[in-house]
Image (cartoon, rainbow, N blue to C red):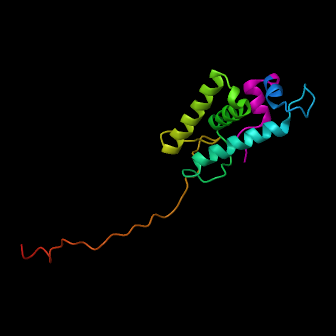
Amino acid sequence: MTYATLQDLTDVCGARELIQLSDRGDMPVDWIDEAVVTRALSDADELINGYLGGVYALPLTNAPRMLIGAACDIARYKLWKDRASDEVVRRFKEALALLTQIQGGRVKLPDQAGVEPAAKTGVILTSMPERQFTRDTMRRF
């Protein structure tokens, strides 16, 4: 499941910027190279899943708006590479901070219906050595 679409990213940064960022010389200058943008969005999805995988069962069925925004900011940063402006870098860092807060449980993700997605379930197994100090072993003291 992808969190953001080409249209979402276009809404965030505009078609003109995407044309400039996706121009690799293969397409006419007035077209967005969808393969380049799709790759950046896919990279953003993988990064987001890396943060969410330990907390939520993936894939999420409905991406909350906050994840769509984070995916757009991450993809935009990846498209800019090392030429990113201060605003692009700031928004990328804010997206990573949000993902860290989600991963740590300080921010919960609602779905479109306002319900939190299913948490990752599992069984925790523990083992301990036998008690050394019991009533029987301490009777002599």
Magenta stretch mostly in which secondary structure?
A: helix
- In the image, residue 25 sits, relative to residue 112, either above or below, namely above
Considering only vertical position in the picture, is 115 above or below 130? above
The answer to whether residue 3 is magenta is: yes
Count of numbered badges drawn on the protein: 0
Q: Quadrant of residue 84?
A: top right
Q: Position of residue 135 (x, y in %)?
A: 15, 74
Q: Is residue 97 left or right of residue 66?
A: left
| Residue at the right extreme of this rendering | 28
Residue 7 colored magenta? Answer: yes
In the picture, the quarter occupied by the C terminus is bottom left
User: Looking at the rendering, which quadrant does residue 96 occupy?
Assistant: top right
- Using the rendered image of the protein, determine whether residue 79 is visible from the camera's viewpoint: yes
Q: Which residue appears at 58% of the width and 47% of the height? A: 52
**Magenta residues, as a range?**
1-16
Q: Residue at x 90, y 26 (%)?
A: 29
Residue 60's spot in the image, x, y percent?
Answer: 65, 49
Return the x and y of residue 69 as percentages of the image width and height.
66, 32
Name the side, left or right, on which 6 lies relative to 110.
right
Q: Nearer the viewer, residue 110 or 43?
A: 43
List x then y, in percent, for residue 4.
72, 38
Question: Observer-nearest residue: 62 or 14?
Answer: 14
